[in-house]
Image (tube, coloured by chain):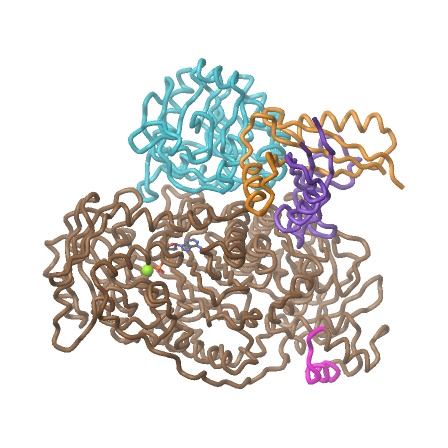
Chain colours: A cyan, B orange, C purple, D brown
Amino acid sequence: MKWGIVRFPGSNCDQDLYHVIRYILGQKATYLWHKDTDLQNCDIIALPGGFSYGDYLRCGAIARFSPIMQEVLAHASRGGPIIGICNGFQVLCESQLLPGALIRNRTLHFVCQHVHLLGEGPALKQTKLYVPIAHGEGCYYNSPDGLKKLEYENQILLRYCSPQGTITEEDNPNGSLNNIAAICSPNRRIWGMMPHPERACEAALGSTDGLTLFRCFLQQISTA
Amino acid sequence: MMKAKVLVTPKQGILDPQGVAVQHAMSQLGMSCVTEARVGKVIELTFTGENEQKTREKLDQLCQELLSNPVVEDYHILWEGKTA
Amino acid sequence: MMKAKVLVTPKQGILDPQGVAVQHAMSQLGMSCVTEARVGKVIELTFTGENEQKTREKLDQLCQELLSNPVVEDYHILWEGKTA
Amino acid sequence: MNNTLNTQDTFTTAARLGLTEHETQLVLQILGRNPTFTELGIFSVMWSEHCSYKCSKPLLKKFPTTGSSVIIKAGEENAGILDIGDGWAICFKIESHNHPSAIEPFQGAATGVGGIIRDIFTMGARPILLANSLRFGEIRGHNPQALHNRRLLAGVVAGIAHYGNCIGLPTVAGEVSFDPAYEGNPLVNVFCLGILRHQDIRLGRASGPGNPVIYVGAKTGRDGVAGASFASRDLTEDSKKDRPAVQVGDPFTEKLLLEACLELFQDAEAVVGIQDMGAAGLTCSTCETAARGNSGIEIELDLVPQRETDLDSFSIMLSESQERMLIIARKGHEDRVLNTFKKWDLDAAIIGTVTEDGLMRVNQHGTPVAEIPARRLTNEAPIYRLLAQPPASSTHIPPQPNLNNLELTAALGALLSSPTIASKRWIYRQFDHMVRLGTILSPGHDAAVIRIPIHEDSAESPAYKYIALSLDCNGHHCALDPYTGAQLAVYECARNLACTGARPIGLTDNLNFGNPHNPHVFWQLEQATEGIAQACIHLGIPVTGGNVSLYNQSPLGPIDPTPTVAIVGLIDDPSHITPSYFPTPELDIWLLGHPYGHLGGSQFAKEILGKKSGPCPQLNPEQELALHHLLRQLIAQGHIASAHDCSEGGLAVAIAECCFHPLHPVSAHCDLTCFLNPPAQTCSFAELLYNEFPTRVVISANQNNAQKILESAQAHHIPATKIGRTTPHDSPLTLQLANHKLTFDRAQLYSSWATALESIMQLQPTT
Ligand SMILES: Nc1ncnc2c1ncn2[C@@H]1O[C@H](COP(=O)(O)OP(=O)(O)O)[C@@H](O)[C@H]1O
Ligand SMILES: [Mg+2]
C-alpha cells in the first residue's frame, strides 16, 4: 500500500503520520502538496491534523477548495480509501465526503489529553482504545435524521467512553452528539476521526492502541 | 465600491456554548434581563466592480459554499449599497 | 421582549488574519472583486424587561467591558426594537 | 541630510521618545549633526533597555558562557547553540512578553510565542517544543481584581494555546504561580527549543557588499510601533492608550514562514545571513546584521510590503508587525529566495543591498531619512551603573509548634488546592503537548522529557536524542533573599532534571524585575544575577542566552524579583527516563536528603498563616550537587522507580503528589517518626511537613534495592531514610508522626488538587 499524505498550508501532523506509516506500519508514504493535482498513484489518501489555512473562518472550510481536494473527491468517487484525522476529519466533513459537522468544543477550550474510546461496527467491533485527542472544534454535530441514518447504516466507528467502556456524558470531552468520535462513509472506505491514532503507536509515547486502529482500517479497506 | 455584511449564526437548536457563556456572564454582570444570547460571525466585505446583480448572486453562492456551513449555520446578507 | 445584535469587529489598522484568509479564498473562488474582508463576531441578544433606556445604557457598558475588547475591537449595536 | 530637526526640537522630541539629555548628546556626537525624526526614533528603540541592556549588561557579564559543548555563545547571535553529539545541536531561549500581555493578554501572549519561535528558526534550527513561565495576582474570590486576574490567566493561556497549537509545536512544560506581588503586572515568559545539524547554523550577519537585502513574511502595519521602548517603561493607567495598535499574531503565516525558511536553508548557498524582526522590527534587524557583518546596509522603504497606505518612515522602521524576517541573500540567488516564499504564498521583496561604508542608510521615496553608523548604534549604547541598596530586613516566621492534628491535616488539603500548588492541568490541557511525537514525560512530571529524531529520511529505523527541560523560580524566596532565591531556582531546576535521570547542559534565564532606578530593585537584580552565575559555575553549565525584563511594576509597586531559569538536560539512555509518580503499590518510599527546616518563605506561611515572611530557606550547594549525582547514579543502576523533589508545599505535598498519577494512582503510608527525636534538630510537626528547604527528593524503589540505595547515598554523603510503603490507590494516605497519625482520603485529596484551578476558573464570567 502506498499512502499519500496531503500537506495543506498549516498542516502540522503530516510528519507524525509519515513517521508512523513509514517506521511503524512499514508501508510506503509520500507527501502530496495542496497545489498539486496528481495523487501520484497513492492507494490511500490521508488528511492529517493541523490547522489548514490557519483554520480561519471554519476548520477545514478553506482547505476543501484546494486543488488537490478535487483529485481526492475523484479518488473517493472511485471508491478509493481515505482517512482523515482531526483537521483531516473536519476537511472531510466540509467537503461532504462525510456527513455532519465539527463545531466548537462545549467547554470552549482546546483540549489535549488521552481519552478512552469504544469501537463499534464490523471493523472495530467492541474494541476498547486509549488514544489522545487535541482539538478546539471537535464537537460532532448532525441533524436528528442524519444521526439516525449514521446509526442505521452502522457508520459510527468510535465513541468516547469511560475507562470501563461505558458511554457516559461525563466522558464526552467536547460535547459530541451521542459521544461520537469517529465515523465512516456508507461504503466504509472513508474514515474520519477526531482522535490521533498516530500519537498512540509506540509504547514510549504512552499507548499503542493507535496501531490497532490503523490495522482495522487497513483490514476494512482490503475487504470492503 | 460596494459593501456588505454577512451574518453567520448557529442554526436554531444547535448547541451554542459561546452564547450560553455570554448570557451567563451578562447576567452575572447585572443584565439578568438577557434571556438568550447567540454568538456568530460577521464578515464585512468591500467590493469593487460594476455588475451589482452578478456580485449579489455570486456572494449568495459563496455564502452557502464557503462563508457558512449549512449543516450548522444560517446566513444573512446586509447590503449597504454603493458608497463614494 | 427586545432584541439587539452586537457587531464586534477588529479595529482599523489591527491585523485581521481571518479577514485576509477569507478575502484570499473568495478571490480564488471567483470573487476577485472583494478588495477587503474583515471578520468579527455577532452576538444576538434577546431581552425581557421594561426599562428600555436602562437596558440600552447597560448593554453599552457591557459591550465595552465584556462583549468587545476595546484594545483591539470596535463594536456597534443594532437595535431591533420591540417585537411581539 | 534633509529634514533634520533643529536643536531645540531634537531635545524635546528625544525626551518624548524616552532618550535622556546625555543620550541625545551622544546621538549628536555619533551623527556629527542634528538627527531626523526617524533617526531619533531609531536611537530611542535601539537604546531602550529591551534592546541595549544598558542597565543590566554589566551584571550579565558575570554569567559563565563557555563550555566544551558551546557552539554559539550567549549574546553573539539571536540565541546560543549547544552541541548534543553526533553532529547535532540544540538552540533554545526564553523571552518575556509581560507588558503586552498586561494590556491584551491573548494577543500579548500569542505574539510572545511567535517571537521566540522566530528567534530559534532564524538560527537555522527547526523549533520542536515550547514552554512557559507565568505569574499572576490572586485569582480566588469575587472581587474585581480577582476577576481581572482570572481574565488575564484565561487570556494568556488561550493566547499561548492559539499560537503554539496552530503552528504545531508541543508546549511540554511550564510553571505558574500566583501572588499579589504580580497584581497589575503579570509575567509571561515563553521558551522555545530547536534542533539543527552543526553545518546548518545560520547567522544574523549582513556581509558581502552588493548582496541583496530581502524582506519576507507578513506586511508591515502600524502594529506596536516602538514596542521595545514600551517594554522599557513602567506600566501606568495610561498604558492602554500608549499603544498605537496592538500586535496581532498570525500563527498560520508564521508556520508558512518557518517552513519556507527551513526549505530555503537546504540550499547552502542562497542565504548569507538572516534575522527575525522582533523588538524594534526593521530597525533592529538592519542595523544589527550590518554591525555583526562589519558592513553597511541600504534600504528603500517604498519597497517594503505594507498593509496600510500612508505609513511614514518612522512607523515603518519602528513597527513591530509580526511574522517578518530579513534575509541577506547571495547575489545571483535572489530568485531562489523569492520563489521559495512564493511557493508558500508569502510576500518577499528585495528592499536594499549590503554596502561597504558601515552606514545604515534608509531612504523613502528616493530621499534619505536616516543615515547612521550601524556599529556605533548597536555597540555604543550608553551603559549605566545604577545605585544598589539592600532593603531593611524582614520579619521572621515562628516555628508554629502548637498546631493540632486537625490543623495539620487541613493544611495539606488547603495547600494542595491553592492555585500555586494545585494541578496545572486546566492550563496544559489547553496546550497541544503531544504533537511531533516526542513527548515522553508530559506536563505533570518534574521535568518534561522529549525525544528528538536525528535520523535521515532514508534511514532503516529511527534514531533519537533524549532531552529534559524544566523551568523554575520562586519569587517569594527571591523577595526574601534574591541571591539565595536565584540560586535556589537554578538548583531546583537542575534537581528536577536529575529526578528524571537527566544531566543539565545549559541554562537560559529571564530576569523579571521592577524599575532598576529604584536602588532596592537594582540591588535585587545584582544579587539575583550573582546567584545565577555562582550556581551555573558550580553546576558547570553555561548560560546560553536570556532576556531582561525590567520596569515590571504597577502603581502598587515592583513585582517580586523573578529570575526565571530554564535548564535543558540530556538523557543518554532512554531506559533511564524516570517518572515523578509512584508507579505501583508495594514499593519502599525513601527520602533522600534531610527533612529539616523552618517555615520562612513557604506556601504554608503564606496560605495557612497568611504571612509572607522569611527567612529564605538555606542552601548547601555541595550537598545539592551530591544529591543530583546520587540520583543519576541510582537511576542509571536501575535502583529506583520514581523520583519527585520537594518544592512548594514541602515534604507533605511532595508525598501526596507522588500518589496522583492520573491513570494508575497509588496511595502511601509514611512514618516520619524517626525525624522527630534526632540529637541535633528540633523541628515542629508543621515545620517537618511543610518547610520548603531544598535538597531533598522522595523516591520509590523495590525493597530488594534497599541496601544499594543506602550504600550509594552514604558514598555521596546524602542521608537516605526509608519513610514508608506505597499502597493500593483506595487505601488511605497516612503520615505518622510518633503517636500522631494524619489520615487522608487519597481520592479526595487528589480531586481537590486536580480540580482546584478549574473550579476557580469557573468563576469566570466571560466568553
Ligand atoms: N504553564 C504551564 N504550561 C505547561 N505545563 C505546565 C505549566 N505550568 C505547570 N506545568 C506543568 O505542571 C507540572 C507541575 O509544575 P510545578 O508545580 O511548577 O512543578 P515543580 O514544582 O516540580 O517545578 C510540571 O510538569 C509543569 O511542566
Ligand atoms: Mg519538581
Q: Is residue D611 left or right of residue C14?
A: left
Q: Please determine whether, in this image, residue C23 is positioned above or below residue D306.
A: above
Residue sitting at x 39%, y 29% = A214
Q: Quadrant of the C terminus of chain D?
A: top right
Residue sitting at x 84%, y 66% = D367
Q: Is residue D312 left or right of residue D759?
A: right
Quick check: which quadrant has ligand 2?
Answer: bottom left
User: In the image as oriented, which residue stretches furthest toward the top?
Assistant: A152
Image location of residue D422, percent across then percent down: 36, 54
Q: Please determine whether, in this image, residue D21 is positioned above or below residue D460.
A: below
Image location of residue D30, percent across then percent down: 72, 82
Q: Please determine whether, in this image, residue D703 is positioned above or below residue A97.
A: below
Residue sitting at x 39%, y 77% = D481
The kind of secondary structure the magenta stretch mainly shows is helix
Image location of residue D589, percent across then percent down: 17, 56
Q: Quadrant of the N terminus of chain D?
A: bottom right
Does the magenta run of residues contain D535? no
Q: Is residue A35 left or right of residue D705?
A: right
User: In the image as oriented, which residue stretches furthest toward the right?
Assistant: B84
Image location of residue D168, percent across then percent down: 50, 46
Instruction: Indicate the quadrant where residue D631 lies.
Output: bottom left
Residue bounds of the magenta highlight:
D17-29
Q: From the viewer's side, name the closer residue of A5 and D311.
A: D311
